[in-house]
Image (spheres, rainbow, N blue to C red):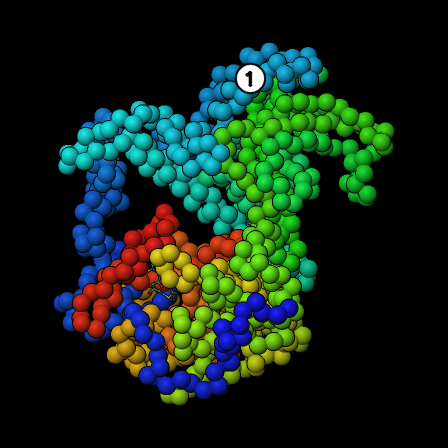
Amino acid sequence: MKSPFKESNFPRYECIKQEPSSEAIGVSVTKIIAQRVQKVESKGSLERRRSPRLKNKPQEKRPCYDEGQSMELDAPELDICNKEVEGESTGPVERRLCPRLESIPDKSRPLYDGDQRRELDAPKHVACKKETGDYNLKRRSESPGDNAGKKRSYIDHSMQEWLPDIDRKGGEDGLKRSGPALGSLPLKFDDTEIELENNANLKWTDYQSFVADSIKQKASTAVKETTRTFNNHHLRCVQEEEKRYENVEARDPQVADYTDNASKKNKQSYTEKQVGYLPGITVGHKFFSRDDMVATGFRGHWLNGIDYIRKLCGKLNKHNEYSSLVAVAIMLSGQYQDGVDCLNEVVYTGQGRNNMNGSKSQTKDQVMHCSNLALENNMEQSVPVRVICEHKRGDNQSGKVYTYCGLYKVVRCWSFKRTSGFTVSKYRLKRLQGQPKVKIDEVCFERERTIGKLHGYEIYRAVMQLNMYYFHAHANIVVTENHFGPVVLLLVPTLLEGFKYIKSVQVARNVTIPPSASGCDCKGNCTNPRSCSCARLNGFDFPYVDIDGGRLIEAKDVVFECGPGCGCGPSCINRASQHGLKYQLEVYRTVNKGWAVRSWDLIPSGAPVCEYFGILRRNDELDNVSENEFIFDIDCWHTMNEIGGRERRQGDGSAPANDPLKKVEVKMDESESEFCIDAGSCGNVTRFINHSCQPNLFVQCVLSTHHDIRLARIVLFAADDILPMQELTYDYGYALDSVVGPDGKLKQSPCYCGTEECRGRLY
Ligand SMILES: C[S@@+](CC[C@H](N)C(=O)[O-])C[C@H]1O[C@@H](n2cnc3c(N)ncnc32)[C@H](O)[C@@H]1O
């Protein structure tokens, strides 16, 4: 298809053949980028790393980073936290207050002590009801049909209790925050203004929303962390399976622990599962596997459509059974049409009596017990159920996404004879009012919508034919790369004039790349970690598992991949980061951070996303370049060894005793790294990736061709499962007040990452 734009608007840049002159190198801010997603716990005197720019500043004028001092500089109120940590405080610990709240009289302040927090985090109403056995006080009706009609008003009213408090007054969009979000906090829910000491007025509603936000954020961080841990366990388990498959005995006893822990964790969440709203998992939340749902306690079972819980009460129901079961969640799979905005009403078929080994067709009548009975009890006892929709992934990889659609009430239950002659239970469920809208098929939709919105042409087809993307004034640059053709980058000429797109690191003339290391003797693919010498360098294991094209099990100090000196072929799993861009990445414009990068595809955790390309230079060459914000220090060794105030990532000691890295140790006693990658004048999509204090990518040093860590490759990996259209970010790892301008003065730059962990400044 022909481009809708004039050819002249689309300059195409070839990969550069020769290194650009140093004069051509970029014009903008300072330097250094480096990250660590997992930071080690703060160790007394350990400083955060500081910028090499500090070299230009006399020692006495350099900023201090140790905890006490930086607190003094940054925020006096942090002193309170400090004391808490150090255990100096003897009386009840005073918690850190939002500066806005400091002047509110003591008795009017919300309480934050542990017990109350717990109450807030757990669905409070669930707990109360369990204790009082309140469910069973309600009269059970004889006929399900009558039941629905008669009890409707009651159900409508009572079910609101199960919604997240935060959404109760929020209306359809759930944006407005309301008082009840604060659970048992002693707050007034009106617009009364509180007089502050500085004569400013604070509305209670602001105050409430501040607290509500912080509660909600903490819970969502906990969910994120659980999912991350689970993903790690999951990849470990996959590795175990791969080994079993290869009939290779597990050498590392830790692996068994991981497997055990994963199952223990799941068992634990099974017993802890809750009815109703779960803090941290809001409507629209996406899970990427059934395991994720179990790990976070959202569901207690991998397979069953109806997930139920046993309540401790002892009433007989109409089936002469104890009505101690209620369903907590049901899974809808393939029962809806793509693109349905919101499932306000669903009809659900009970489970059981199918031939699970063969055709999956029904072989007997369904009976009203266990899960089916539980779902009926939901109706009779006015207990809402979480509904999850299963749908296919938006990219072309196989797999599913599970979207949480919200809480539903069961309004009717009946039995139905199918044409096969067997009976099934049927349930009609209605979505509770006051929940945010959800697009169940968001993952698939976003990409299509973006393409449509940007161009109004059949761009998707053009992509397939021409192997590249067109862009629009709003999107500006789109990068793609595939197995057949060269990288294509289309730029808005006025925005990035002179910038060249490259698809490998270019080497400056005064830098010599060491000769290739001798590699492993494997043939075809490396599969046996005991005989593969590259696996040995990684601690006698392959760092990747063979799913989704290779996923890194966990961050390491350094990953040794197979290289040109190895006997294995290009499809070897231990070359996972060498295949270029696998995901379609888009460079787009943000409001306050300049350009940014997002993916049109779903990226699974541990997947290599992109490598930092630019010109490989000596660091000292750039000492007088003051304005270049696209320089990445290759400081893997310094980070591993905590040299120059750097924080070591929680490594796993992957480098064995006869580590080839030891050979370079002597050369690297300086506190600053020797080499860097300068993407000021040429680079790839990675240079547009912004910083976040809570990133979804992490930086991993990779060695493949040679084993000189001073010249390691810098590859960004997914730290989480990343949804399409989510901004990709990593932690630049600046120490605060570590960057000095050409005038010798400290430079500060605000951070707009917008995460709850935000430190407020980039440096
Ligand atoms: C490597 S560049 C990233 C791409 C850049 N946004 C652009 O438009 O080219 C680093 C620069 O982006 C901006 N930046 C990145 N992350 C940021 C953040 N979280 N908050 C504010 N600015 C950010 C800063 O100006 C920083 O020096």
**Residue 235 drawn at (x, y percent):** 57, 55
Q: Is the residue 11 above or below the residue 86 in the image? A: below
Residue 633 visible in the snapshot? no
**Which residue carries the number 1 mark?**
153
As rendered, which of 637 and 138 lies closer to the eye? 138
Q: Quadrant of the C terminus?
A: bottom left
Which residue: 36% across, 50% down?
Answer: 754
| 422 horizontally vs 676: left or right | right
Q: Quadrant of the N terminus?
A: bottom right
The answer to which image quadrant residue 453 occupies is bottom right
Which residue: 22% across, 68% down?
Answer: 740
**Where ligand 1 lies, by quadrant?**
bottom left
**Residue 71 drawn at (x, y percent):** 21, 51
Which residue: 22% across, 29% down?
Answer: 194
Rate crowding at label 1 as few (under 14), some (14 to 19) or many (20 or more) other CA atoms within 10 Å: few
Please tell me how many numbered marks the rendered image carries. 1
**Residue type at the position of mark 1:** Ser
The answer to which image quadrant residue 36 occupies is bottom left
As rendered, which of 490 and 203 lies closer to the eye? 490
Residue 22 visible in the snapshot? yes
Q: Is the residue 720 above or below the residue 439 in the image? A: below
Q: Is the residue 756 above or below the residue 515 in the image? A: above
> Which secondary structure lies at badge 1?
helix
| 591 horizontally vs 728: left or right | left
**Residue 475 drawn at (x, y percent):** 48, 62
**Residue 125 drawn at (x, y percent):** 46, 24
| Mark 1 beta carbon near ligand 1 (under 8 Å) | no
As rendered, which of 15 and 425 lies closer to the eye? 15
Which residue: 56% across, 43% down?
Answer: 439
